[in-house]
Image: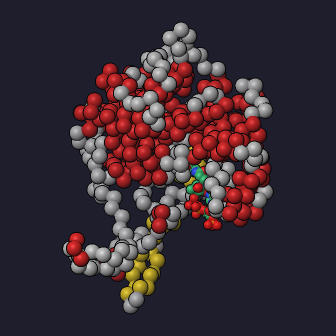
Amino acid sequence: MATIPLKIEDKEVSLPVITGSEGEKAIDIRSLRQDTGYITYDDGYGNTGSCLSNITYIDGEAGILRYRGYPIEQLAEQSSFVEVIYLIIYGELPTAAQRARFSGLLTEHAPLREGLIRFIQGFPRDSHPMALLSSSFNALGAYYPHLVANTLNVDKPQFDEAAAIAISKVRTIAAHSYRVAHGLKLNYPNPDLGYCENFLHLMFSQPYRDYVAKPEVAAAVNLFLLLHADHEQNCSTSTVRMVASSGANLFASVSSGVNALWGPLHGGANMAVIEMLKHIHADHDDGTRFIQAAKTGQGHRLMGFGHRVYKNFDPRAQIIKKSFYKALTSLGIKDDPLLNIAMKLEEIALNDDYFISRKLYPNVDFYSGLIMRAIGIPVDMYTVMFAIGRMPGWVAHWHEVATTPKLKIHRPRQIYTGPAKRDFVPMASRG
Ligand code: ACO
């Protein structure tokens, strides 16, 4: 086994090298503290491999994203979200029989229990749907006690059931939260519709008229979800894995992932892109002033630009950009002032040395917010849409952790920078 020598003070240690299936290399520092008393410091974990995982491969420099070995471009072109869910969770593309069985499970688990519906209806009208989604996911565990009892010994039929519940109910909960927030009657899932069409029906059907999704709208939703299905150790997925490492059940772990996704630097970015465009528009700016402020660090960041991992381009952004223009044409959308601002921002930033030198390119959120807007998804649902898309990734990562032999609870270390030891000061002596 290859090793790397490291000299610390008067001690020399040999650290093993781990090589991934695509040739990526890591120094295994697990024995470092025990052998030398040192730990490593990596604020934000930008250079830390937190696990071994066989789900998704990313090469940020080359703009590569593969689910279980399959390039994202091929999946986007030839597959569907439901097939990709199966691939991500079970490791292989489904056969026709597996696909039919899986679709059957999704149909069976689409409706919510009446108690959970009442729970959702009890939220205030102005609740953010992400609060509702994470709470409802946590509450799901209460309805399936047999699925939350012994999660450190994952049993296959129970995992299949829990996974199907998570994947299917996330879209029902998401759509119900939208209907509640808008004071609308809830729709029941329609077993005759595909995954994306059913979601659009749950969102938009009215008691007096069924919503029938245009094929290009269903295709845009399908593509959006497929492109978000997994992204290895991002903030929300690492959160799910962290929670799972304590032995927490799938619903509790995923609920934590929803909360992590909510932040504007992660899943909230697609919504923040539209808010930013509205702000620029209201300011009678064409984007030039906003970009100038973003560059000084005194204004807001240019939302939808930059990525921790992709430093040349985000392959998902390239795919969604192409389909975005197609969808705009088929939906007959032109002369949207926000769209014009977005295009101007993109043009300025891609030619500006500040963004070029820092390798800041449009990420998937820059276009996904625009595509959601074009197909009529309300802006406060964008991050929820991301959560629906990311569900298979969270489920697969939870499973990877829960089935790890000799699982270790995740517990990073820190460098303490607070006051040194001091003696307690009684109230009367405090100045
Ligand atoms: N606008 C302006 N400047 C930026 C931006 C931006 N969007 N992103 C990074 N920078 C600048 C930083 O100010 C910093 O400049 P400096 O070196 O002069 O101090 C430099 O670029 C590096 O920035 P970091 O924050 O160190 O980059 P990091 O990799 O930690 O952050 C992140 C990545 C969080 C995505 C960041 O680029 C950002 O905030 N982007 C906007 C939010 C966004 O679009 N998030 C979506 C992420 S993708 C996803 O979740 C699907």
User: Where ligand 1 lies, by quadrant?
Assistant: bottom right
Please, which colouring scheme is shown?
Answer: secondary structure
Residue at horizontal 64 percent and vertical 61 percent from the top: 298
Q: Does the rendering let one see residue 67?
A: no
Residue at horizontal 28 percent and vertical 49 percent from the top: 247
Q: Does the rendering let one see residue 110?
A: yes
Identify the image quadrant of residue 251. Answer: top left
- Residue 392 pos. (x, y %): 46, 39
Residue at the limit of the structure toward the bottom, as seen here? 10
Residue at the limit of the structure toward the top, as seen here? 208
Identify the image quadrant of residue 253. Answer: top left
| Above-or-below relation of 13 to 161 | below
Q: Report the front residue among 335 and 391.
A: 335
Horizontal side of residue 179 vs 59, given as left or right: left
Residue at horizontal 77 percent and vertical 59 percent from the top: 352
Horizontal side of residue 357 vs 182, given as left or right: right
- Residue 193 pos. (x, y %): 51, 18
Identify the image quadrant of residue 118. Answer: top left
- Image quadrant where one finds the C terminus: bottom left
Horizontal side of residue 416 vs 71, given as left or right: left
- Residue 78 pos. (x, y %): 62, 33
| Above-or-below relation of 145 to 64 | above
| Above-or-below relation of 313 to 180 | below
- Residue 125 pos. (x, y %): 44, 29
- Image quadrant where one finds the N terminus: bottom left
Residue at horizontal 43 percent and vertical 32 percent from the top: 170
